[in-house]
């Protein structure tokens, strides 16, 4: 991530000298910050304040946001202590799922990876101020929490659908519908959940 920002920052510095292609580089910097920064972080809030300004007027500010994000990534300052603890715990579950998958236990791997996803979704709700308990006191189901996170803008509709698909695979494994999916789909589940946890730390 730092290398991507390094490349774009260097391109910005070159474009700023001649004012050629500056708008394109600013757009790419914005996209990189959106892609890399944690939703709701200071970087995203600062970028949101610049979005509607013309490219030439916001170029310097976007460049500085990108530099700050890059420097913090290199220094290891972009994660809170709680996020690091959650990441370590969830990583252990995903390593267990990957190990089971390599040992030809795809069904157990799917259940464990799916459970790690649900625990992460619940933690993401807590971090984002999204309720996880229904009015009758019952815990909210994973699909409902997924929908609420999308409504709150934590992630978009495409990500909601992907999370829902992962949960569907986990449910098939948990209910013994082992023919509904194959080993490769479980591999994609494990890898996808790992990437999701990195993109949306809780």
Image (cartoon, rainbow, N blue to C red):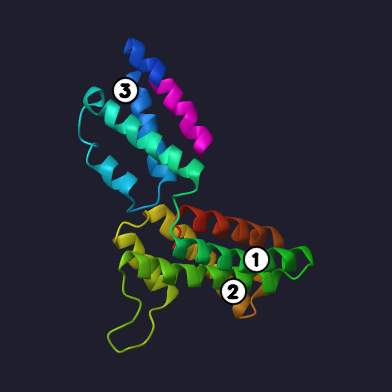
Q: Earlier in the sequence, mark 2 or mark 3?
A: 3
Q: Tell me which corner region of the image, top left, top right, bottom left or bottom right, holds residue 121.
A: bottom left
Which residue has dot 1 on it? 181
Q: How far apart are the two marked residues, 2 and 1, measured between alpha carbons?
A: 8 Å
Do the residues bearing badges 3 and 1 touch, measured as CB atoms within 8 Å? no
Residue 17 locus on image (x, y percent): 35, 12
Q: How far apart are the two marked residues, 2 and 3, measured between alpha carbons?
A: 47 Å
Q: Which mark is residue 23?
A: 3
Residue 62 within the magenta-colored segment of the rendering: no
Q: Considering the numbered disc 3 on the image, is that residue within a helix, a strand or a loop?
A: helix
Q: How far apart are the two marked residues, 3 and 1, measured between alpha carbons?
A: 45 Å
Residue 6 locus on image (x, y percent): 48, 30
Do the residues bearing badges 2 and 1 touch, measured as CB atoms within 8 Å? yes
Residue 185 locus on image (x, y percent): 64, 60
First to last magenta residue range: 1-12
Q: What residue is shown at x 68% (from left), y 68% (from top)?
A: 96
Tell us which disc is closer to us: 2 or 3.
3
């Amino acid at each position: 991530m730092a290398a991507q920002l390094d490349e774009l920052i260097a391109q910005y510095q070159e474009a700023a000298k001649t004012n050629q292609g500056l708008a394109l580089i600013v757009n790419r910097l914005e996209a990189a910050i959106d892609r890399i920064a944690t939703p709701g972080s200071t970087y995203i809030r600062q970028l949101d304040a610049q979005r509607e300004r013309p490219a030439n007027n916001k170029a310097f500010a976007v460049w500085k946001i990108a530099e700050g994000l890059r420097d913090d990534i290199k220094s290891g300052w972009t994660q809170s202590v709680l996020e690091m603890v959650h990441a370590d715990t969830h990583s252990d579950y995903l390593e267990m799922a990957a190990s089971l998958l390599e040992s030809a236990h795809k069904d157990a791997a799917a259940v464990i990876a799916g459970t790690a996803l649900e625990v992460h979704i619940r933690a993401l709700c807590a971090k984002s101020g999204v309720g996880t308990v229904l009015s009758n006191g019952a815990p909210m189901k994973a699909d409902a929490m997924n929908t609420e996170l999308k409504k709150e803008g934590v992630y978009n509709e495409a990500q909601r659908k992907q999370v829902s698909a992962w949960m569907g695979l986990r449910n098939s494994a948990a209910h013994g519908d082992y023919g509904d999916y194959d080993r490769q789909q479980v591999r994609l589940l494990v890898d996808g959940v790992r990437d999701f946890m990195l993109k949306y730390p809780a």
